[in-house]
């Protein structure tokens, strides 16, 4: 799965690892999972099966924070063809109070985004087989 697909949504009908399957099943219920390394405590959002620091197998835990602040963003004027109808759009990194960061589209902007502005995490069913999360301002 490419990074771009990740921003757009998760296909729920593809063959995936048991780890990723659990993540998708939670997402279906509008729950977001992070992963936590039992060895060094590092957290990953979206979850990674193996810790980037010590390579231990991580554990999935529910991530419950919903309010974040805009950490960084890019405005995409020339998107890939599949997203052409949405351009220009904003891909934003939000930072939660815990310090974890998540990348997603901001879909309801009415003016230019500003670093530090509040963001709220929401879920979006793209179609029957695709669900994603997004930022709302
Ligand atoms: Zn670790």
Image (cartoon, rainbow, N blue to C red):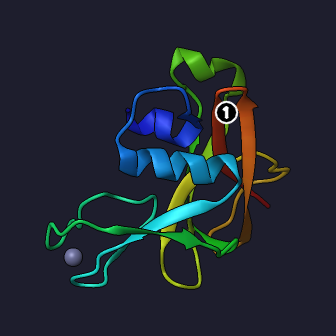
At x 23% / y 84%, what residue is drawn? 40
**Left or right of 81, for residue 3:** left
Q: Mark 1 and ligand 1: say if the CB distance to the nearest ligand atom is below 8 Å.
A: no
56 up-or-down from 32: above or below:
below
* The quadrant where residue 67 appears: bottom right
Let me know if residue 79 appears in the view: yes
* The quadrant where residue 131 appears: top right
Q: In which quarter of the image is ligand 1?
A: bottom left
Q: Quadrant of the C terminus?
A: bottom right
At x 70% / y 19%, what residue is drawn? 85
**Left or right of 79, for residue 18:** left
Give the residue at mark 1: 88
**Left or right of 103, for residue 124:** right
**Picture coordinates of residue 78 (x, y %)?**
54, 25
At x 85% / y 50%, what residue is drawn? 110
The one of 31 and 101 positioned closer to us in this rendering: 31
């Amino acid at each position: 799965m490419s990074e771009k697909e990740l921003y757009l949504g998760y296909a729920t009908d593809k063959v995936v690892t048991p780890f990723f399957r659990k993540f998708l099943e939670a997402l279906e219920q509008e729950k977001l999972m992070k992963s936590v390394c039992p060895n060094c405590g590092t957290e990953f959002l979206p979850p990674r099966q193996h810790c980037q620091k010590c390579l231990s197998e991580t554990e999935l835990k529910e991530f419950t924070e919903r309010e974040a602040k805009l950490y960084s963003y890019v405005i995409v004027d020339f998107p890939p063809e599949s997203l052409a109808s949405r351009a220009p759009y904003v891909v934003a990194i939000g930072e939660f109070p815990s310090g974890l960061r998540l990348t997603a589209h901001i879909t309801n902007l009415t003016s230019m985004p500003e670093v530090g502005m509040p963001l709220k995490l929401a879920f979006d069913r793209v179609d029957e087989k695709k669900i994603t999360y997004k930022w709302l301002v």
